[in-house]
Image: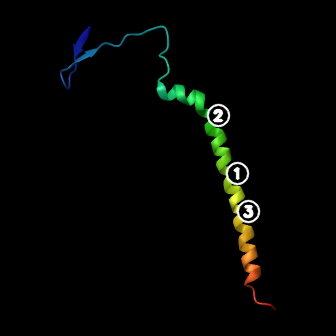
Amino acid sequence: MATGNLVLNQPTLRYVETASPPGRNLAQTMGHYLWGPMALMGLMFVATAFALAIARAQLSVDLSEEFTPPA
């Protein structure tokens, strides 16, 4: 049965209690299946950043040795 909304005076449905919980929506279903690939992608980002940091540090050392005047 519909009742009138006090603010907009539009019909609203009454709350109906059920014994079963509501199902998952689309975002929850996708999160259930995609948490593994997302965690793996994050791990790959961290590993790539670590490798690039090592390469940049090595390049920095090589350049500082190249352009350091002899003592």
Residue 45 x %, y %: 64, 49
Residue for point 75% across, 82% down:
66
Q: Of label 3 and label 1, which has the lower sequence position?
A: 1
Q: Secondary structure at mark 3?
A: helix
Residue for point 49% across, 29% down:
27
Residue for point 66% across, 56% down:
49
Q: Of label 2 and label 3, which has the lower sequence position?
A: 2
**Dot label at residue 47:** 1
**Dot label at residue 36:** 2
Residue count near mark 3 (Cα–Cα under 10 Å), binned few <14, some 14–19, many ≥20: few
Q: Amino acid at mark 2?
A: Gly
Q: Secondary structure at mark 2?
A: helix
Q: Nearer the viewer, residue 8 or 59?
A: 59
Q: Of label 1 and label 2, which has the lower sequence position?
A: 2
Q: Quote the CA–CA distance across marks 2 and 3.
A: 27 Å
Residue furthest to the bottom? 71
The quarter holding residue 13 reads: top left
Residue for point 71% across, 73% down:
60
Q: Quadrant of the N terminus?
A: top left
Residue 14 x %, y %: 31, 12
Does residue 29 lie above or below 54 as drawn? above
**Dot label at residue 54:** 3
Q: Secondary structure at mark 1?
A: helix
Q: Quote the CA–CA distance across marks 1 and 2.
A: 17 Å
Q: Tags 1 and 2 in contact by the CB under 8 Å rule?
A: no
Q: Nearer the viewer, residue 10 or 57?
A: 57
